[in-house]
Amino acid sequence: MNPTGYGWLVLAFPLAGMLVVSLGWRVLPGRAAGWIASAAIGGAFASSIGMLLQLLDKPEESRSLVGTAYTYADTAGFRADLSILVDPLSVFMCLVVSGVSFLIHLYSLGYMTSDEGFARFFSYLNFFVFSMLLLILAANFVLLIVGWAFVGAASYLLISFWYRRSTATGAGIKAFVINVIGDVGLVIGTFLLFDGTGALDYAGVFAEAESAFGRNDGELVAACVMLLLGAFAKSAQVPLHTWLPDAMEGPTPVSALIHAATMVTAGVYLIARMHPLFELAPAAADVGAVVGAVTMLIAATIALAVTDLKRVIAYSTMSQIGYMIMGVSVAAYGAGLFHLMTHAFFKALLFMGAGSVIGAMGGVQSLDRMGGFRKAMPFTFVTFTIGALALAGFPLFSGFFSKDEILAFTLNRGGGYAVLAVVGYLAAALTAFYAFRMVFRVFFGAPVPEARELEEGHIAHADPANPATGEKEDTGVGFPGPEHHVAEKEPSMKAAMAPLALLAIVAGAMGIPGVTDTLEHFLEPTFEDSRFRETHPSEGEEWLGLIVGGAICLLGIAVAAVMYLRRPGSTARLRARLAPVHTFLENKWYFDELLTGLFVRPTAAFGRFGRTAIESVFVQGVLVGGAVSIVRAGTSFARAIQTGELRAYAFLLVAGFSGLVLYFLIVSI
Amino acid sequence: MDIGWFVVLSAFIFAIGAAGVLTRRSPLVILLCLELMLNAGNLALIAFSRMLGNQDGQVFALIVMVVAACEVVIGLGIIVAMYRRRLPIDVDQMNELRG
């Protein structure tokens, strides 16, 4: 089979899994739905490997293939196909997405066992993975937009999975609305590109772009900024990031799936895919780089103050995506995608560990209530710490190589980009600090009652309450299930976390400067037309960057260790002294309030105005009321002449004819 | 003979028929008056046919007679049916189609 054949299989497996699970959930026994869904994603992963092997067989210059199933529309100057593009970039993304998603499915098998919506959960998960793979494999903008919108819809379904929890439905709506803003950006960007180049498929647009627009042409920059808007909304970059922390309302595997491995990396993928355009429009690329840098810093500072375990990880995701966006925007494509991969591994791992801890706490997510789980949960402790080390960029862990490669590339661009790199190093220090703030607060210190209970072998009694509001809930459909699960007792959760932990340690080996460049070499065919192909830091600079990055990481971890292990009370004093800063950070830089004031309130006010003034006065009163009264008057006249009197009808007939005859008589004279 | 006389006679008969249709309440009389109106038309057709010297008008008159005969058959049938059901034979009382 050729690579595109495998590409179609990659899409077919999750789609089939979704259909089987969602249509057959009534007849599927026990946990079969979960196994079918997991097998479907496993099939997609296997097909991705098939795609990879087929692609590696081909010579480098012919490693970009388009497979067309049928043509949607073909008219003068417009052609839209249902076609997929298989090239190193899409194969790489497919491998990461389907591989990590497979492990997350496995994890969910254990984590979601007691939930009433077990089959529904897995059909959503499969739909989500299908949408994401569609987005990745699309060979033209039409299919890209389809996948892009599907992903938004799937994330809405998954975030508000516990649909009887009002905070969860609110978060789902927020995520969906912000994602739709991004969708609109993407669609407008596509319009502008189509307007200029007359093509909708990537190859056509890229080939025409240079002659159609020219360098830094206004329309091209506008189109790229619109694409960036889509990327920012999907990848939770400032100021469209507020949905991501709220999305933690979803079940923990969803947080791992959407907010680590897949959905949020769509923006990074988009920029990497559109690199010929962004290189023609450096102004737009600079916007991406600056926003990425700003996001990584803002998110890292918020993560210092947030006390919800999952939200800390969510902010770290935002921050790490900021690195990737900055990386691909400064043309460090290989480095950005390398970080995307390593981040997918260690962030999914961190979320899984967090899910296990939350299970042990009976659903409580606040760091303030946790502590001393080291002995009670040795497996979770080890894997979570590995994830945190990789996140912090501890030497020789995967995040160490990937993050510092981005920063080395950024520094190498010189000029203003050096400032961005410095921001990146600053954020790296904060990252190391908050990563170990989590580790030390969760696993070290005096064991909390839940930890003691677990040490004795049983899980703390689940408290069915909303962790955000403390509201009491029942455990029926639409609420979390009655049982909680920890990795120590669930083989499937362990089976998912162990490979990720391994990958979080060794994945860095794919890009050690001067030693290996497996990933960069593999991705080369996609990016060979890049004009920055020859500008990369020397090995010496990269190693210098690694040493600096490692030192910064150690510094951050050391500070965290001092504050949380050696002098546990020091944080409270610090908080008291820096109260305004703490409040500012705890309120997430007031972004929610800012967006509410700037957009939500005016829109709501406009909506109310529309309802009272336009709808009830103009539409209901004039348009609907006018039409109704015209019809009513007409019918009452028609009713009045329907007397049922034969002679009256005859009279009307005669009078009418007489009138007609008279008229003609008068006319003829 | 001048065509004017025929046309005037035809108009008179037509007017008498129309007046009958409008004023009488018995369906039987109304049917008769309708016949009167149709035959007024026939008279005019034949008169003009004679004047112009071709036979088209006569053919029309024959067709009108056939139609009139059919109409009478149906009309009389309805009247007989009404009579058998002891319904009032009065068009003013049959106003159930009022809107």
Image (cartoon, coloured by chain):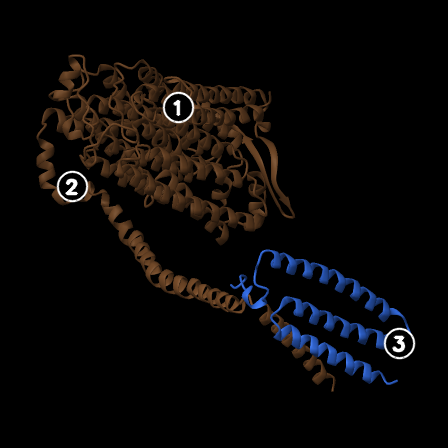
Chain colours: A brown, B blue
Look at discs 2 and 3 and give the one toward the viewer.
3
Q: Where does label 3 land, which residue?
A: B50
Work out whether residue A559 or residue A229 is closer to the camera in this orientation and state it: A229
How far is mark 1 from mark 2, CA to CA? Answer: 35 Å
Number of residues whose C-alpha sits closer than 10 Å to that of mark 2, classed few (under 14), some (14–19) or many (20 or more): many
Kindly identify the amino acid type of the residue bearing the numbered disc 3. Answer: Arg
Q: Quadrant of residue A612?
A: bottom left
Look at discs 1 and 2 and give the one toward the viewer.
1
Kindly identify the amino acid type of the residue bearing the numbered disc 2. Answer: His
Q: Where does label 1 land, which residue?
A: A100
Query: Tag 2, which secondary structure?
Result: helix
Query: Tag 3, which secondary structure?
Result: helix
Residue A286 at least partly seen: no
How far is mark 3 from mark 1, CA to CA? Answer: 103 Å
**Residue A143 at what x, y percent from top left?**
52, 38
Kindly identify the amino acid type of the residue bearing the numbered disc 1. Answer: Val
**Residue A2 at what x, y percent from top left?**
60, 22
**Residue A195 at what x, y percent from top left?**
55, 51
Number of residues whose C-alpha sits closer than 10 Å to that of mark 1, classed few (under 14), some (14–19) or many (20 or more): many
Look at discs 3 and 1 and give the one toward the viewer.
3
Up-down relation of residue A84 to residue A227 (above or below)? above
Q: Chain of mark 2?
A: A
In the image, taking residue A521 as reference, residue A343 lies left or right, namely: left
In which quadrant of the rendered image does the N terminus of chain A lie? top right
Up-down relation of residue A460 to residue B15 (above or below)? above
How far is mark 2 from mark 3, CA to CA? Answer: 115 Å
